[in-house]
Image (cartoon, grey):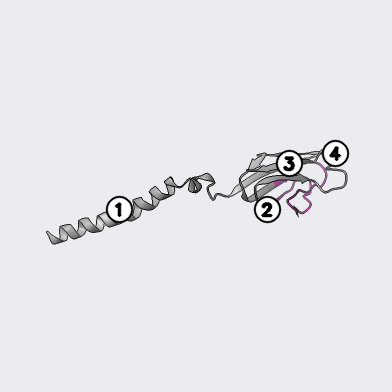
């Protein structure tokens, strides 16, 4: 009988260690608000516009996956960071950490932003 009680007590303790943290995580709204998940935004660059796969993201680290589908060189600038120049047909990556707010983005090649290569990303 003693072994049976000991085994039951061990099983109950293991179950409590598993269920209590799960229940606490579900009960706390902040635990569900924004999962700590990598965010990626595809950015297609052409003459003279950007197409983003999403116009808004959650606060945190965002990886911009850049593709130059145009015929001339372009880059991507947001939140004080600028990608290298991306040659036609090539790709690049820009990783930026963003807080809540609105972030203008643009191509820094002279005349490109004025021609339409600009926009605003929302972080909420």
Asked whether the beta carbons under mark 1 and mark 3 sit within 8 Å of each other, the answer is no
Residue closer to the observer: 22 or 37: 22
Mark toward the viewer: 4 or 1? 1
Which residue lies at the image location 81% right of the left edge and 47% below the top edge? Answer: 73
Q: Is residue 6 left or right of residue 59?
A: left
Q: Which of marks 2 and 4 precedes in the sequence?
A: 2
- Residue labelled with disc 4: 115
Name the mark on residue 15: 1
In the image, the segment drawn in magenta is: 66-95
Residue closer to the observer: 68 or 30: 30
Question: Any magenta on residue 67?
Answer: yes
* Relative image position of residue 43 (x, y in whole percent): 70, 43
Give the spatial CA distance, label 2 vs label 3: 15 Å
Q: Which of marks 4 and 3 precedes in the sequence?
A: 4
Question: Any magenta on residue 100?
Answer: no
- Residue labelled with disc 2: 96
Which residue lies at the image location 26% right of the left edge and 54% below the top edge? Answer: 12
Q: Which of marks 1 and 2 precedes in the sequence?
A: 1
Which residue lies at the image location 28% right of the left edge and 57% below the top edge? Answer: 13
Question: Quadrant of the image for the C terminus?
Answer: top right
């Amino acid at each position: 009988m003693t072994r049976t009680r000991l085994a039951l007590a061990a099983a109950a303790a293991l179950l409590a260690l598993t269920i209590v943290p799960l229940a606490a995580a579900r009960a706390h709204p902040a635990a569900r608000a924004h999962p700590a998940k990598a965010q990626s935004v595809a950015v297609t660059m052409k003459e003279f516009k950007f197409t983003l796969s999403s116009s808004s993201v959650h606060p945190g680290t965002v990886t911009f996956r850049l593709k130059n589908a145009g015929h001339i060189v372009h880059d991507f600038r947001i939140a004080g960071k600028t990608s290298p120049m991306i040659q036609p047909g090539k790709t690049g990556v820009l990783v930026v950490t963003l807080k809540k707010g609105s972030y203008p983005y643009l191509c820094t090649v002279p005349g490109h932003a004025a021609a339409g290569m600009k926009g605003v990303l929302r972080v909420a």
